[in-house]
Image: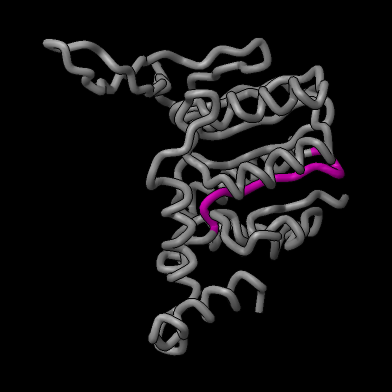
Amino acid sequence: MKKIERIIKSIIEKSGGSPHKIKLAHYMERINHAFAFAPRNYWLGVTVMKSPMDLAVLQQIIFDKKPDTIIECGTAYGGSAYYMASIMDVVGIDGKVITIDSESDQTAIYRRKDLINVNGKAVCLDVEELRKPRSSKIEYVHSDCLTASLPMDTGKTMVVLDCHHSASHVYKELEKYSKLVTIGQYLIVEDTDGKIHSGTGPAAAVKKFLKKNKNFVVDKNREMYGISSNLGGYLFRIS
C-alpha cells in the first residue's frame, strides 16, 4: 500500500469512520478530481485541466527526457500546451508542442479580480478575457486526433493522450500515436484512474494495448504522489 493511501486510511479512522467500508480507489479518484477541477487550476492565467501533482510529474518528465516534440491530443483551453511549452523554454529545449483538437476556435479563460469604485465603495469585479494562449513553441492543429496529419521527422517525441475517453477511441489513439513515440520517451494516457468505468475507459484501452505491444511498459515510478489522473497511464518506450 502506498504511503498516501495509508495516510488517507488513518485520517478516516481518526475521524471515526471505517476505511474497510469504503472502496479506497473510488475515494482516491474523488480526491484527485477535487485537485484537478475544484477550483480550477491555472498556468500563467490559463485554465489547465490537470491536477497540480500531475503537472509536477509532467515537468519532471520534460526535464529528464528533454523531448524535441510533444504531441498532445486534446487542446481544451490550451493551458496544458502552454504549460509544457513554458517548461521547454525554462529547460532550454528548442522544440515544439503540437496540440490537436477538433474544435475550430479554442479559447483560454484568463480570470482576474479587480477593485472598482462604485458610489464611493470598493467593489470586487470578476473579469474574464477569452483568447488563445500564444507561444512560438505551440502549433495548433484543428483536426480529429485520429485523422490528423502530422510530420514524421519530429526528433525525440513524447505523446500525451487527453482527447475522447472511450476505450475504443483511446485504443485507436494508442495504435496511431505509439508509432511516433521514440525510444526512451513517454506515451502518457490521461484519465486512467476512472475506476467506476474502468472497463469502458482509457484504462481498458491501455490494458488491451499492452497485451499486444511489448515496446512499452508502465512506469509506476511516475505515480510518486499516489493521487493522479494517470494511474497506470505513464507508458515508457523501451524498444
Vertically, is 50 above or below 67?
A: below
Q: Is residue 47 left or right of residue 170?
A: left
Vertically, is 169 above or below 86?
A: below
Measured from the top left, where is residue 37 in percent x and y? 41, 46
Q: For residue 26, what is the image quadrant?
A: bottom left
Q: Residue at x 49, y 19 (%)?
A: 142
The N terminus: image quadrant: bottom right
Q: Residue at x 76, y 42 (%)?
A: 61
Measured from the top left, where is residue 99 in percent x and y? 58, 26
Q: 237 or 179, which is in the foreground?
A: 237
Vertically, is 53 above or below 81?
A: below
Magenta stretch contains residue 190: yes
Q: 84 or 34, which is in the foreground?
A: 34
Q: Is residue 38 left or right of residue 123?
A: right
Measured from the top left, where is residue 130 in percent x and y? 36, 15
Q: 192 or 182, which is in the foreground?
A: 192
- Tell me the chief SS of the magenta region: loop
Magenta stretch contains residue 217: no
Q: Which residues are magenta?
A: 182-192
Vertically, is 23 above or below 66?
A: below
Q: Residue at x 17, y 17 (%)?
A: 121
Q: Is residue 208 visible?
A: no
Q: Is residue 32 left or right of residue 211?
A: left
Q: Residue at x 45, y 30 (%)?
A: 47
- Residue lying furthest front: 120
Q: Is residue 36 visible?
A: yes
Q: Is residue 137 left or right of residue 67?
A: left
- Residue lying furthest left: 119
